Image (cartoon, rainbow, N blue to C red):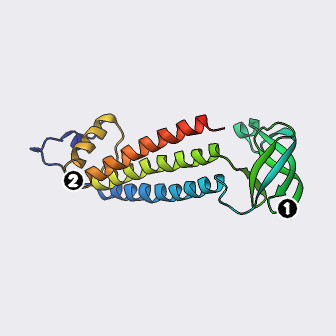
Amino acid sequence: MAVPELAATSPFCPLPAPRPLPRLFGVGVVVLSLACMGMMVRQAEKAAGLVAGKGTLTVERCEQHREGGHGRSASRLQTLCFGSFRADNGRVVRDGSALRGWYVTGEKVRVYREGYGYHPVGLRYFWGGLAFFFAGLAGVAVGVMTTVVGYRVRTIAEGRAAWAVLRRTSVAPYVTWLFRTAGAGTAVCVLLLLVSP
């Protein structure tokens, strides 16, 4: 159900004052989206190989394990491959290292070591991290829009009304730019993700 005051987008109909709670929600969405974007940039950087602890994991065997938990999560299978890890500097060699995913026996996988886990290095993972970065940019745009308009958009009609209100502000070109950049960036990254080896 549309919010009645949002439907009144005519310049001759005065809109009620924006509410503070949706504005706080919008600020929270912006902050959370920016934090997620920062994490995704860091993950993409690591996936590109710009991280310490890089090396090669030679796969010896792969197994499927049932994840712990109760209910539906207990029925989920997780594939782990085990092998020997050799650091690029040649100093660190670890047998029995585990890597999530399914790989061919004997395959040499470029990885980086973080904590007790190993994560793959490659263009597919780089583009995946950047795709989530641009999706976070869309979250920033939604948060800014909610903060400026003062209403949470739940339906298409409310979205149109919110855009009509937003267009009357000086922030409108920036929000439009954020949405366009987020859409184009996500599309390009997903396309490159699909064609990357």
Q: Position of residue 138 (x, y in %)?
A: 42, 47
Task: Name the one closer to the observer, 164 or 100.
Answer: 100
Q: Which residue is mark 1?
A: 90
Question: Horizontal placement of 81 versus 9: left or right?
Answer: right
Left-right relation of 24 to 101: left
Q: Reading the chain from its start, which is encountered first: label 2 or label 1?
A: 1
Q: Residue 163 — which label?
A: none
Residue at 19 percent across and 50 percent down: it is 168
Q: Nearer the viewer, residue 136 or 70?
A: 136
Q: Residues within 10 Å of mark 1 (few under 14, many from 20)?
A: few
Three-letter amino acid code at the position of disc 1: Gly
Mark 2 vs mark 1: in front: 1
Element class at badge 2: loop
> Against 50, is 183 above or below?
above
**Image quarter of the N terminus:** top left
Tell me residue 16's x, y (percent): 19, 51
Write the residue at 49% across / 40% down.
188
Categorize mark 2 by other alpha carbons within 10 Å: few (<14), some (14-19), many (20+).
Answer: few
Q: Residue at x 39, y 55 (%)?
A: 25
* Residue type pointed to by label 2: Thr
Residue on which the image places disc 2: 169
Q: In the structure shown, which secondary structural element does the residue marked by tag 1 occupy?
A: loop
User: Between marks 2 and 1, how big is the CA–CA gap?
Assistant: 59 Å
| Quadrant position of the C terminus in the picture | top right
